[in-house]
Image: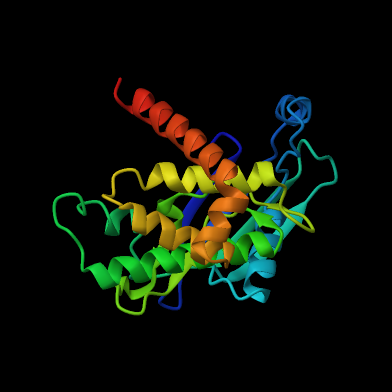
Amino acid sequence: MPDRTTLRFERAGKGYFLKFHRGVGWPEILKNLLAFRLPILSAENERAAIALLAERGVDTMVAAGFGKVGCNPATMRSFLITEEIASAPSLEDVTANWSEESPDIADKRTLIREVARVARQMHEAGVNHRDFYLCHFLLREGRLRKPRLALIDLHRAQIRQSVPVRWRRKDLAALYSSAAHIPLTHRDFFRFIVEYYQLPLREVLRAEGDELGRIRQEGDKLRAKFLRKYST
């Protein structure tokens, strides 16, 4: 990205990732403000999201270093160092061939519940991700039995007392669109929403049926946009 560089390095045999933010400039700040969005000005946003999610029991990155220089919001420079999560493929990679090779049913069901649990705990903590795709879930040790999921790439995350319905919908729509390549059944979707809402299915459908329809519509639009972009 023009305003951000990410690189990997090692120290004492251990891997780390460094994100360096150069400053976004006034045009980018104004563009975000005119769209009623708060601009991301530094790595401090991701550091705060990591700390809050870890406090609330969401497995995520471990911050190992942070620094910031400057007071001008358009030109301040900052960095965040996080520990590498080694031997942990993303769920996008794990599920890439599930349409050809069906996974173990029990493993798939457990994974669906775990993804829903992470989504619920993140939103309950007042955090919305804004890039909530399967590629940002890492499966620790690549283990499908008793999976441990780590949520990464939080630099655009927003933190509030509670997540507005609009932003919760955007996260869930993004997740839905990124799972479009997986052959999911109605029962799989029901399993997800029961875990996410922590209510019996009948109550979820009665209370959130309209919202679930909006999530699906927005997810379908995201998927169509993705396919148009990468098919040309």
Along the line of sight, the residue nearer the viewer: 200 or 168: 200
Colour setting:
rainbow
Q: Residue at x 67, y 53 (%)?
A: 43
Q: Residue at x 20, y 52 (%)?
A: 97
* Residue 91 in the figure: left or right of residue 73: left
Along the line of sight, the residue nearer the viewer: 56 or 41: 56
Asked if 199 appears above or below 45 in the picture, the reply is: below
Asked if 65 appears above or below 207 in the picture, the reply is: below
Asked if 172 appears above or below 39 in the picture, the reply is: below
Q: Can see residue 180?
A: yes
* Residue 146 in the figure: left or right of residue 19: left
Q: Where's residue 100, x and y in %? A: 14, 50
Labels in figure, total: 0
Residue at the outermost right position: 71
Residue at the outermost left position: 100
* Residue 49 in the figure: left or right of residue 135: right
**Location of residue 126 by image quarter:** bottom right
Along the line of sight, the residue nearer the viewer: 109 or 223: 109
Q: Where's residue 84, x and y in %? A: 45, 68
* Residue 29 in the figure: left or right of residue 219: right
Q: Where's residue 151, x and y in %? A: 51, 62
Q: Where's residue 187, x and y in %? A: 35, 58
**Location of residue 196 by image quarter:** bottom right
Q: Residue at x 55, y 37 (%)?
A: 214
Q: Residue at x 40, y 52 (%)?
A: 135
Screen quadrant of the C terminus: top left
Asked if 81 appears above or below 186 in the picture, the reply is: below
